Amino acid sequence: MDGTEGSAGQTGAAERSRRSSVSSMGARGADVLVYLADDSVVPLAVENLPSLSAHELHRVVREVLQLPDMALDVFALWLVSPLLEVQLKPKHQPYKLGRQWPELLLRFSDAPDEDVAVDEPSLQFRRNVFFPKWRELQIRDEEVLRLLYQEAKGNVLTARYPCDEEDCEALGALVCRVQLGPYQPGKSAAGSLREKLDSFLPAHLCKRGHGLFAALRGRGAKAGTGEQGLLNAYREVKDVVSNDSECDASLSAHYRAYLLKCHELPFYGCAFFHGEIDKPAQGFLHRGGRKPVSVAISLEGVHVIDSREKHVLLGLRFQELSWDHTSLEEEEPVLWLEFDGESEGTPVNKLLKIYSKQAELMSGLIEYCIELNQAEEPTAPQDSGSGHTTALGSSQPSMQRPKLRRQGSVVCSRLQHLSTIDYVEDGKEIKRVKPKRTTSFFSRQFSVVQGSYSVVQPTDSLEQG
């Protein structure tokens, strides 16, 4: 099941799990409900639902929404519940997978039996995790752009995509432009923003005080930090003028600007999985424990995100890692990530253990993404600065997307928050070595790329301390 992922707090997911995507079923036909990213519903009347493939149902959705043929590559059908998310292959039969949902949950989730018994997936029309970002920038159809924008906006507002505050404000300003129209100085924009602040900013930036002071502020006091930053960013949004008159007359330019800003986020378009990692030992008693994480996997690499703090703990391109998974009966399933690092200034290899019943799915997705990259590498234009690719077509000049490198940015790795196994040879911990590069501890890696990961191994004159 390519693109399978664990749900991480999607808006409305709990509600959708209580609503079946099959609203009624007769002897020959059925009414199928397909949910879009904005929670709107596309009702479909289909024949022979039990034998209908995802590819055939995808075609019906495209016809109802009047989407161009390219939407076949841009979007995919997903089965989604709060416990598990599965991107369907074209050959999958959604109805049969829905009937098998309890078995899938027992295999790929840690949910208790009572939650498994009541969980029910909904059928959703979402971005295809295997659709490259550089192709997304070539899209001209406004409805396709709108659907992508709505999905990205939902992921930002629910903090599935962690963002720095100024990026949240910039993205929120574009949402203001789409929903409220151009900024007009003569109108009371601040009041409009305050009423719908959670439609523009993630919840942690919308927090207001309570009691007397909050009431006084509501009667004319200054706006909060997030609110004021959003207002300033909204004021700066300009209507883009391009050679495409259709874009000028519509919201396409703002949808595109929102997506382009999201492309700076390294986990945009990823599939997400649930997992846990060991906490670094702390205190006199060296107590550790575990912390919940989301593992985001896309065509570009793997990111481990702290589920509570909403920031990146580790980000690796496929060229920078080796991986494997173990699933022994007497032990928890584990996804192993191996990468270069340092220990007290000395180059070492680091192993990160991610405990998850979805380890097998994560490993399979990593392998498939690497295969796709290797197959498309000769044709896709490369952006050497960020590892991303860009191809805007002949109608627009190529633009370089900057990497986010702010000090303390939520998208920067925080290796100091990880508990890793540091080794040099045969998995042994060695504090001081004189290293040389050889092969990986794991055989599974993106080995065709120059500068790819290789293990650190001691020389004959190994010095231990």
Image (cartoon, grey):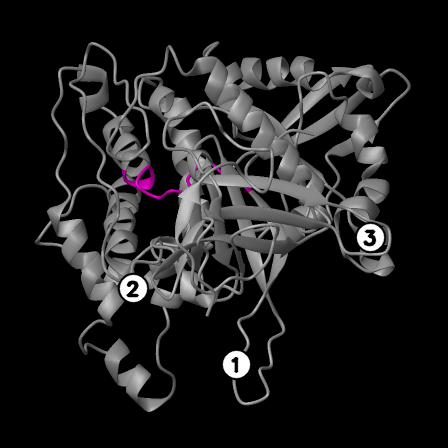
Q: Which residues are magenta?
A: 261-271
- Circle 2 packing at 10 Å, graded few (<14), some (14-19), many (20+), is some
Image height of 308 relative to 160, above or below? below
Q: Is residue 361 above or below residue 220?
A: above
Residue placed at 11% from the left, 47% from the top? 236
- Examine the rendered structure and indicate whether residue 238 appears above or below residue 14: above
Q: Does residue 56 appear in this view?
A: yes
Relative side of 340 to 130, left or right: left
Name the spot of residue 130 as percent of width and height, x first: 51, 25
Return the residue at label 2: 194
Label 3 or label 1, whichever comes before in sequence order: 3
- Assess whether residue 70 is covered by the magenta stretch: no
Q: Pointer 1: what residue?
A: 282
Q: What whole-number distance in Å separates the C-alpha atoms at marks 3 and 2?
A: 39 Å
Q: Residue 309 in the image: state x and y as whole percent.
A: 45, 66
- Residue at horizontal 54%, vertical 90%? 284
Residue appearing at x 57%, y 34% in the figure = 366
Q: Secondary structure at mark 1?
A: loop
Q: Amino acid at mark 1?
A: Gln
Q: CA distance from mark 3 to mark 1?
A: 36 Å
Q: Does residue 4 appear anywhere in the picture?
A: no
* Amino acid carrying mark 2 in the image: Arg
Q: Which of the 4 image quadrants contains residue 192?
A: bottom left
Q: Characterize the magenta stretch by its predominant secondary structure.
A: loop
Q: Which residue is mark 3?
A: 116
N-term mark: 2 or 1: 2
Q: How many marks?
A: 3
* Quarter of the figure that contains the N terminus: top right
Q: Are marks 3 and 2 in contact (CB under 8 Å)?
A: no
